[in-house]
Amino acid sequence: MGPAQPAEMLGKQLKLTSDQQSKVLDILKLEQSQMEKLRSDSSLSQDDHRSNDGYPQVQIRGLLDSDQQKKWDKMQSERGRCRDIGTTTSIRVHRRMPLN
């Protein structure tokens, strides 16, 4: 999935203006490009890979008005909980697998 689909979804969920939507798409395209470069550079450490974590979210939040920011914060909070649940579930599933 490219950056256009998430930008469109955010546009609908947050009721972005066309200018905001365009800027969000630019941010997501840049993030995708940077992630591809990070993946292809095997000389980078885990810390180097994590150095960009969260920055696109900060940029996007900065484009939003106060009502949109409240929705954004709620979306990010729910997204974090889903990640935590997924991690917990995967650990539980992994532990149930028999050892050979």
Image: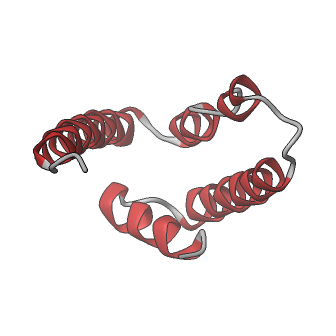
Number of numbered labels in the structure image: 0
Residue at the front extreme, as displayed? 100
- For image coordinates 70% across by 23% down, the residue present is 47
- For image coordinates 64% across by 57% down, the residue present is 28
Q: Is residue 74 left or right of residue 95?
A: right
Q: Is residue 89 left or right of residue 72?
A: left
**What is the x, y in percent for residue 45?**
77, 29
Q: Is residue 33 left or right of residue 54?
A: right
**What is the x, y in percent for residue 66?**
38, 32
Q: How was this image coloured?
A: secondary structure
Answer with the quarter of the image where residue 96 lies.
top left
63 to 47, vertically: above or below: below
Of residues 58 and 81, the one drawn nearer to the viewer in this rendering: 81
**What is the x, y in percent for residue 9?**
39, 68
Answer with the quarter of the image where residue 12 lies.
bottom left
Q: Is residue 13 left or right of residue 31?
A: left
Answer with the quarter of the image where residue 63 lies.
top right
81 to 3, vertically: above or below: above
**What is the x, y in percent for residue 64?**
49, 41
- For image coordinates 65% across by 65% down, the residue present is 22
